[in-house]
Amino acid sequence: MSAYPSNLWSIPLLVVIPILVAVVVNLIYNRARLIKVISLASAICLALITLFSSYGYHWFTGQPALRPETLTFTFDPGLPAWRLALEFYFGPLQQAMIFIMSLILIFVVAVATSGLTKRQGPYMGMIFLLYASAAIIIMVNDFYHLWIAVEIGSLVVAGVVVGSGTSVSHKAALKYTFFSALSGAGLAIALALILGLTGYPNISDAIMYIQSVNLGEMSIILYVAFGFFVLSWIYAGGLAPIHPLKSEVYGASFPHGTAMLQTQSKLMLVAIGIVMLRVFGNLPFVREVMLAISVITMMLGVVMALIQTDFRWILAYLIVSHSGLVTVGISLGTTEGLVGGIFQAINDVIYMTVLLLCCEALYYFGGKTSTRHSLGLAKKAPWLGVAIILGTMAASGIPPFNGFQSEIILIQASLKAGLPEVAAVILMVSVTTFIALFRAIYRLFLKPPETSEPIVEAKVPMVLHVGLWVLVAITLIIGIYPNIVVSFITPVAEAVSLPWYL
Amino acid sequence: MIEVTIQLLGFIAAAALVVIGIAGMLFLDNLIKKIIAFTLLSDGVNLLLVALGYVEGGVVPILIPGMSVSEFAARAALVFPVGIVLTNIVIGVSTTAILVALAIMLYRRYGTLKASKVLKGERR
C-alpha cells in the first residue's frame, strides 16, 4: 500500500456506488428479487473495495493536501482564500471503520431483503445513503463535505425510521428532523465562521493557519464555532441532552435499521470528534466540555435502559449510553484514550448488531419484545438464547469478548489522565449494562411462560443465523486478538493525541 | 465608531433571522409554523454566508479576458460561500419537504397540527 498522494479513483467509489444503488433500487422499487441481488452484490463490492484499496487522497478541486514532489503541506498564507481543497483521505483508520460498516451493511441488507415485502426499494435506498453519508464523514478532510454529509445523514435517518411505518416512528422522525435542522444550521454557521477566520475550507489548511497565526481577539470566533460543532456532535451521536430523541429513533426503527443507524452514528461520533480535537484541541476547556457531555450521556443512557420494559428500548438506551463510552475516549484526547474510544466504537457497532439481530429474531417467535410477560423462549429457541447471552457478555465487557479489550483500554487511559472518577463511571456502565440486559434475557428466555398459549413461530431466515454467528465469532476473535484492530488505530491516535493538561 | 457597511448590515439581518427562526422552532406550537420558522433559520444562515463572501467594490468571480490574475484575486467576490449557499438551499428544500410530509402524515392520524398534542409520548 502506498502513501503517495495520487488522486485515487477507488476512494470516491465508496460514496458513488451506494448513491447509485439508492437511485437504482428506487427505480425498481417493487421488484424484490432484483433489489436483493443488486443490494447484496453492491454491499459485498463495497467491502472488497475497502479491503483492497490503496491508502491515499482523492481531491475534487484545488490543491491536494500534500505536494506530491516533496510530501509537504500546500498551506501558504499567500494563497488566495478562494483556492479550494475539497478532499477525501483513506488511511488505515478509515479502512478499518468503513470495512466494519460494510460488513454490517451486508448483514443488514441480507436480513432486510429477506423480511420486507412492501416499500423495499426506497427503504433499501435509505440504508445505502446512510452508508454513503457515514463513509464521507469518515474520509473527509474539508468542512464543506463534512457539513453536507451530516445533513444528508440526518435526512436519511428520518427516512429509515419512517420505514417501519408506525405512528411512533413518524413522531420520532419529525422530532429528530426538527433538531437536525437546528444542528445542521449550526454546523453551517460554524463552517462559515472558520472559513471567514482562516479562508480555508480544507481542515488541514485551516489548522495550519490557526496554529501559525496569532488570532488575538478573533479567537472568540473559534469558541463560537466550537459551540456549534458541539451541537452537531451531540446531535450526531444522540449525546446528552438530546439522548431521548436518538433513543426514540433507535427504538422506533426496525432492529436491522437500528443496526445501521447506530453504526453510522458511532462512526460519525469518532470522525467528528477527531476533527474537533484537531481544530479546537488547543483551546482551553474544550476537552473538559466534551468529557462532561460524554460522562453525562453514559450515565443517563444506562439509567434509562434500566427502567425500560421492552427489549428494543433497552437496546436503544444502551446504544446511546455506549456512545458516551466512545466519546469519553475521544474526549480524553490522549493516545490511549483515542485508541480506546475508536476501538470501543468498532466493538460497540459489532456487539450491538448481534443484540439487534437477536431482537429481529424475536419477531419470528410471536413478535413480542416486551419484558412485562415471560415467554420461556430458552426451550423454543436455545440457539437464540446462547447468541443473546454471548452478545450481552460482549456488551458488558466480560472477557474474552471484544468489549472487554476496549473498555480496559478506556479505564487505563482515564486513570493515566488522572481521572479515576471517569474510570469508575465506565465500570458502572459495564455492570449496569449487564444488569439491564440480563433482566430482559431472564424474562424472555429463562423464566417459564406465564400463559399456556403456544408461541406462534415462523422460520427464521438462514441469513439471520449466518449474520448472527459470524458477528459473534468476530467479537470473540477481536477479544482474543485485539491487535487485529488496534494496529490500524494506533498511528492515527498518536498523530491526533495531545497531552491532557496543556 | 463601527462603520456601517453592507456586509455588517447583512450580518445583523442574518443574526435576526437566525434568532427568529430558532425562537419559532422552539416556542411555536403549530407544526406548520415551526416549519416556516425553520425556513427563516435556513435563510438567515444563507444570508450570513452571502455576507461573508461579499467584497466591497468586487466583481463576479469569473476571469474576464483582459483582467490580470492579481487584480482578479484582489477584487473577485468569494466563490466558496456562494457554493455553500446553493447547497444549503437544496438541503433546506429537502428538509422542508420531509418535515411537511411527516406533518401531513401525523395530521391524518391525529387530526391536529398542535405539536403539544401530536408529539405527545405514547405508552410503549
Image (cartoon, coloured by chain):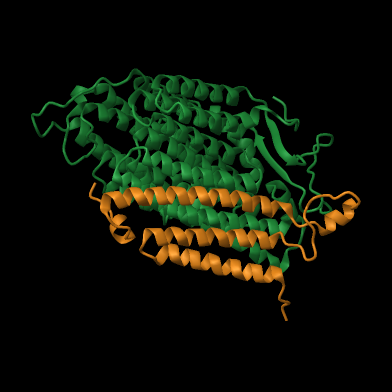
* Nearest the eye: A295 or A200: A200
Residue at position x 44%, y 23% in the image: A35
* Nearest the eye: A310 or B94: B94
Q: Which image quadrant for residue A4?
A: top right
Give the total number of marks visible in the rendering.
0
Residue at position x 50%, y 36% in the image: A129
The shade of chain A is: green
Q: Which image quadrant for residue A490?
A: top right
Name the residue at the front extreme. Answer: B65
Residue A443 in picture, x, y percent from top left? 20, 36
Name the residue at the left extreme. Answer: A452
Residue B77 relative to residue A261: left or right: right
Residue at position x 47%, y 24% in the image: A39
Q: Which chain is orange?
A: B
Residue A321 in picture, x, y percent from top left? 39, 47
The answer to whether A156 is drawn above or below residue B5 in the figure is above
Name the residue at the bottom extreme. Answer: B1
The answer to whether A114 is drawn above or below residue B22 in the figure is above
Residue A81 in picture, x, y percent from top left? 77, 53
Residue B3 in picture, x, y percent from top left? 73, 77
* Nearest the eye: A216 or A136: A136
Could one spot residue A460 in this view of the protein?
yes
Could one spot residue A348 in this view of the protein?
no
Position of the N terminus of chain B by quadrant: bottom right
Residue A99 relative to residue A169: left or right: right
